[in-house]
Amino acid sequence: GRQVKAVSAPRGLAALGLGATAGPVLALMLNTLLGGIVLLLVTGLGEQALELVGDLLDSLAGGLGDELTSPVFLLGLVQAAVLAPLVEELVKPLPLLPVLKRLPAARDALVLGVLAGAGFAAVEDLLYAAGFGDAWSGVLITRLLGSALHPFGAGLMAVAWWHVRRGEPGA
């Protein structure tokens, strides 16, 4: 029979645009909210542990223990290593949810997710370029991997959301 063309140019452009706009906004909001929660937990519950770790790092690093165990540094570390990747991978394809259920095949969800991730990566790279200015060339090497992984991760998550939206068992 005839195959429905699910990924048209307008849908592709919409996915790219939503990935470039709604994805970063959602990620920024959730990263800020979760970062604040982690900061409260670190400053409220871990004071004694932070002091012990700080003493150890002071003896090992020649006085850097206080900086390395400061709540701001720990928040940045948790934010960069744990929260940001989890939040970003979950929210990049979220703007596609209304469309995903109507797509006939998982490959269509993959294509739209990749486009949303590419839009997200482009905006994130622009923000890094603006934030680092002249140092952009040094940051470029690390951003290359992120720029490649954003479309891939968003495509995979879009497929996962496609299965969930269709109510498939085990999704």
Image (cartoon, rainbow, N blue to C red):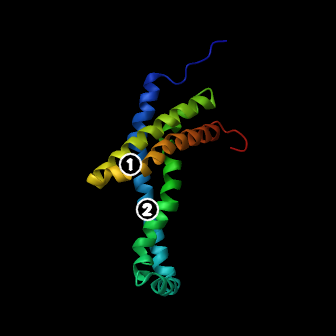
Q: Residue at x 45, y 85 (%)?
A: 58
Q: Which mark is residue 140?
A: 1
Q: Residue at x 47, y 34 (%)?
A: 115
Q: Residue 102: horizontal and vertical position, in percent?
A: 57, 29
Amino acid at dot 1: Leu
Quadrant into which the C terminus falls = top right
Farthest residue in the right direction?
Answer: 169
Q: Which mark is residue 12?
A: none
Q: Give the camera-side residue of 169 and 155.
A: 155
Q: Is residue 12 above or below residue 49?
A: above
Q: Residue 95: horizontal and vertical position, in percent?
A: 47, 40
Q: Secondary structure at mark 2?
A: helix
> Disc 2 designates what residue?
33
Q: Residue 48: horizontal and vertical position, in percent?
A: 51, 87
Q: Give the camera-side residue of 115 and 168.
A: 115
Judge depth for marks 2 and 1 and give the one in front.
1
Q: Marks 1 and 2: in contact by CB < 8 Å? A: no
Q: Secondary structure at mark 1?
A: helix
Q: Residue 6: horizontal and vertical position, in percent?
A: 55, 23
Instruction: Check disc 1: other Cα within 10 Å, few if <14, some if 14-19, many if 20+.
Output: some
Q: Is residue 117 above or below residue 2?
A: below
Q: Give the camera-side residue of 139 and 163.
A: 139
Q: Residue at x 43, y 62 (%)?
A: 33
Amino acid at dot 2: Leu
Q: Residue at x 44, y 45 (%)?
A: 144
In the figure, residue 169 lies in which quadrant? top right
Q: Is residue 124 above or below residue 158?
A: below
Q: Give the camera-side residue of 114 and 26.
A: 114
Q: Is residue 71 above or below residue 129?
A: below
